[in-house]
Image (tube, rainbow, N blue to C red):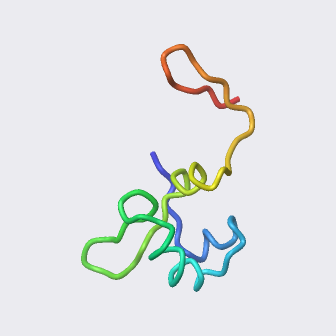
Amino acid sequence: MPTFMSAKQLSKNIHYTDRHINEYLKDRVFVEGVHYVRLPGCRRILYIWEAICADMGLGETSVIPMANGGVCRG
């Protein structure tokens, strides 16, 4: 299950301000449905941590590829 974060929580992990994330990165770098989702019926945006890590080159350093195409995170 993916990890959803607010812009304020995400700002602590990627060292951008929450305002910069919502005003610049959301419209130019992140893609709706891939990097973030909008909650139905409100304006709140939640960012998907795993998708952002994958695109920014962040994440675990000990990843072992498996024969079936998956990975083992050690």
Give the side of residue 33 with respect to residue 57, left or right: left
Give the residue furthest to the front. Answer: 28
Q: Check the picture and name the quadrant holding the C terminus.
A: top right
Q: Position of residue 20 (x, y in %)?
A: 59, 82
Q: Identify whether 66 is placed above or below 48.
A: above
Q: Residue at x 74, y 38 (%)?
A: 61
Q: Position of residue 67 (x, y in %)?
A: 54, 14
Give the residue furthest to the top. Answer: 67
Q: Identify whether 8 is placed above or below 19.
A: above
Q: Position of residue 36 (x, y in %)?
A: 43, 64
Number of numbered discs visible in the structure rendering: 0
Q: Residue at x 42, y 64 (%)?
A: 31
Give the side of residue 59 with respect to residue 52, left or right: right
Q: Position of residue 6 (x, y in %)?
A: 52, 72
Q: Residue at x 35, y 71 (%)?
A: 38
Quick one: 55 or 22, which is closer to the camera? 55
Q: Residue at x 57, y 53 (%)?
A: 55
Give the side of residue 54 with respect to residue 26, left or right: right
Give the side of residue 11 with respect to residue 5, left or right: right
Quick one: 44 or 67, which is closer to the camera? 67
Residue 1 occupies which quadrant of the picture? top left
Quick one: 43 or 24, which is closer to the camera? 24
